[in-house]
Amino acid sequence: MTERARIAAGKGRGRRLAATVILLAWAAGLTALVRREFFRERSAILAEAAMRLNTGATFFVVEQNGRQIGFASTTIDTTGTTFEVVDYFVADLPVGGREIRASARSVITLSRALALRRFDVQIDAPDAPMSAVGTVEGDSAVAFVLRVPGQPSDTQRVAVEGPILVPQLMPAAAVLIAEPRVGRRVTLSSFDPQTMSPRDVRFRIAAESLFTVVDSATFDTARQLFVTAHDDTVRAWKLETDDGGGFSGWVDAQGGVVFATQPGGITLRRMAYEIAFENWTRGRTAADAAATDRTSLSDLLEGTAIAAATLPSSEISSLAVRLSGASLDGFAIAGDRQSLTGDVLRVTREASSALQADWSLASRTPGFRTRFAAELAAEPLLQVNDRDIIALAVRIAGNERDPRVVAERINRWVHDSLEKAITISVPSAVQVLRTRRGDCNEHTQLYVALARAVGIPARISTGLAYVNGKFYYHAWPEVRLRDWVAVDPTFGQFPADAAHLRFVRGGLTQQAELLRLIGTLRLEVLDAR
């Protein structure tokens, strides 16, 4: 296997696992940040809605293609002044041709108006266990500590405006703040901790239906399994988000999830504890196992990460692709090196003239830093002002003042210094610098932090890479020289070739938007040269 083949084999894998397990727990722990204005107007409504919130324990069968692969639960308890929400998820996920046991547990304390007070998130996945513990400081900041075994703790503080709403309770709030009816739309104003900008989450009640839910079980001695003892009929409403991402599932009148879908064909179905957990842990009988078609499982990496594949023998300078099957509204498809005509997207690799910067690190035009404030700023998990990040960036740059030369040096350093390895974690620039390993997300996160630390505007792009006739999930940086230029420290390309199709810009939250294209987007290559 060539070096490039090993690079391609190592990068990107594990992203779907991160999407289905870690992103779920991470979002629950770190939360979407709700603006003060919303709570000023809606705090009383939310407090009233909280009184109708279903407390107690709810259990779920985690399935893929009709086969149980795990267990999940949500427990909500109350005290005189708070709610405590405990979420647990464990599953044997099909990744890279094998099953990987992964779990996530979060303990979250909320006010009686559903505002976050404290959180403790524990994630257990092969080679990448991690935890995040934090508290809310008044209405102005969230302080949290990331811990990875064998690495120093990473303490961070995120400024916020107003109280914080936990995202896994947003579907409940969407149903409880007003009488649910088909066609009703509910907008929850949120603040994205990755972009530090407001974001409105628009829920739509798409349908109403009755569900039969198993609420108790009895043991069948003949089958050595728990079976239904009693079931109940539950009325529920289907919630969707206007952009097609985020939560998709059915919620009852008390805010409890009845059925939900996750990326990769994974579903959560409310069930009695014994059937959801005990049957799974006890294992199936030989007859049941023989009757189960294990090939029906869908590998979570397929179609979203580069598996064992080699790059084209020559880098692509121009690529034309027809896109169909999915709405592309809201995606950053057109602009810079990409042009969209009808349903045809053309990507053209930057010419050498575009690599000549129209500014210098020694002298910048007035207003330069203001113009690119967002692309030079620190963000959560992108620690531009960290002492070690700054020291390395300065060492790589040396006395060079040409942004192109420095940007290429950083690209080469990250490519040469990081081991290409599967990682199942939330990428943090400081942690990547310490571990010196990762896939495309880790390479990109560290590159952007180093570029910004030395004064070069940089941003994260995410989309698809065209490799050996297939498209795979990929992330790469863009830097501002004369114009915005795509580079790729994972593949060691400067600039990145035209095999990179950008769909979104921004951090982890934006990257999750790609999940709504999986299984729907169709791509037809019209030209590649």
Image (tube, rainbow, N blue to C red):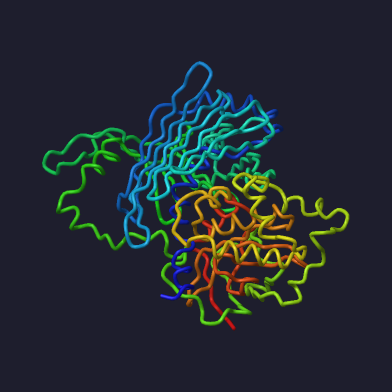
Question: Residue 187's image quarter?
Answer: top right
State whether residue 304 appears in this view.
no
Q: Residue furthest right?
A: 366
Q: Tell me the quadrant of the picture where the C terminus can be found.
A: bottom right
- 361 or 106, which is in the foreground? 361
Query: Which of 382/516 is in front?
Result: 382
Residue 497, image x and y in percent? 61, 74
Is 504 placed above or below 157 here? below
Count of numbered circles on the image: 0
Give me the residue at 64% from left, 36% from top. 34
On screen, residue 94 versus residue 522, left or right, reads: left
Q: Residue at x 48, y 49 (%)?
A: 425
Taking the image as shown, residue 521 lies to the left or right of residue 197, namely left
Q: Position of residue 405 (x, y in %)?
A: 71, 67
Residue 284 seen in this snapshot: yes
Furthest-left residue in view?
A: 222
Task: Please give left or right for residue 145 compared with residue 299 in the image.
Answer: right
The x, y position of residue 444, in whole percent, is 59, 58
Give the percent coordinates (x, y) of residue 229. Answer: 23, 34
Among the 4 quarters of the image, the one containing residue 202: top right
Q: Looking at the image, which residue is at 52% across and 23% down?
A: 51
Q: Residue at the spot x=51%, y=63% of the render?
A: 473
Instruction: Give the quadrant of the N terminus.
Output: bottom left
